Amino acid sequence: MHTVQLLQVTDPHLFGDPATELYGVNTADSLRLTLAAALADGPAPDAVLVTGDIGDDMSAEAYAHFRHTLQDSGAPVLCLPGNHDDPALMTRLLNGDGFQYCGHARLGGWGLVLLDTHVPGRPHGRLAAAELERLDVELRALHDVPVLVALHHPPLPVGSAWLDGVGLTNGAAFLDVIDRHSNVRCVLAGHVHQEFDAPRGGVRILATPSTCAQFTPRTERCVMDRRPPGYRWLRLHEDGSLTTRVGWLPRLVGEPRDENATRR
Ligand SMILES: [Fe+2]
């Protein structure tokens, strides 16, 4: 057993055509640069966790580009879907050969549960009854180890009215399941394109900057932030505690613009 070194990257928003820009950022270049910076800024990861909005245009090619880029990490890649993803394509294209879609995993002395909050055609998230039931079953099976639960939509408001309007619509039901178990230490999300860190009892609720463009925190409407791409390292210790930090690229990739700021 050892301290687990987990690297999270999130919301790369890749396209079938790798020349495509989103919010003024070439998302393929930005993911490549962010992954390289993250790997240079930490130990060899035990796994890379990617918390959704992997593809943006529902194309098989976007997921092929993702596979090609992430396989250089040299670690297993754990994936779950965001609102912009196609869960059926991900199930087909991101399972096997070093990649895993949803389900659960054991890393050292820790358990991970990866959830699907995707609602077809909608920006908000929801956990289907079967997914909430699976969470309960997985947490029971992992009762004797500390657990990190990962999902795209954060289960709590993050303080931006527009973003909280497209959060997890049954966050309370999710937290009810978490509260029935004493082994959950961390809930890790994407979707907010910014750093978020809120303790809730013994559970740390985290979200992480995107590998492309960021949203300005605590705004009524969507406003792009002039912060560079980011990533998060987590160290999951044997005693069930965790330490984490967000890393940022030293400079912007592209020039973030508000042109599609009604998207998320
Ligand atoms: Fe996103």
Image (spheres, rainbow, N blue to C red):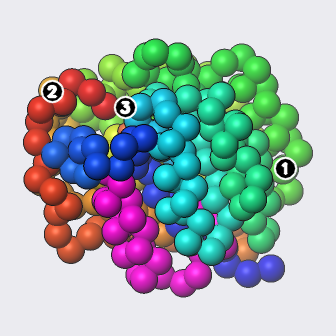
Task: Answer few, some or many: residues within 10 Å of disc 2's Cα (few below 14, many 20 plus, some between 14 and 19).
Answer: some
Mark 3 in CB contact with mark 2 (< 8 angstroms): no
* First along the sequence among labels 3 and 2: 3
Q: Mark 2 is on which residue type?
A: Arg
Tally of numbered discs: 3
Q: Report helix, strand or loop for mark 1.
A: loop
Which residue is tagged 2? 221
* First along the sequence among labels 1 and 3: 1
Q: Position of residue 79 (x, y in %)?
A: 61, 48
Magenta span: 27-48
* First along the sequence among labels 2 and 1: 1
Query: Is 158 displayed left or right of 161 in the figure?
Result: right
Q: Is residue 116 visible?
A: no
Quadrant for ligand 1? top left
Q: Mark 1 is on which residue type?
A: His
The residue at the point 48 percent across, 43 percent down is: 62
Which residue is tagged 1? 143
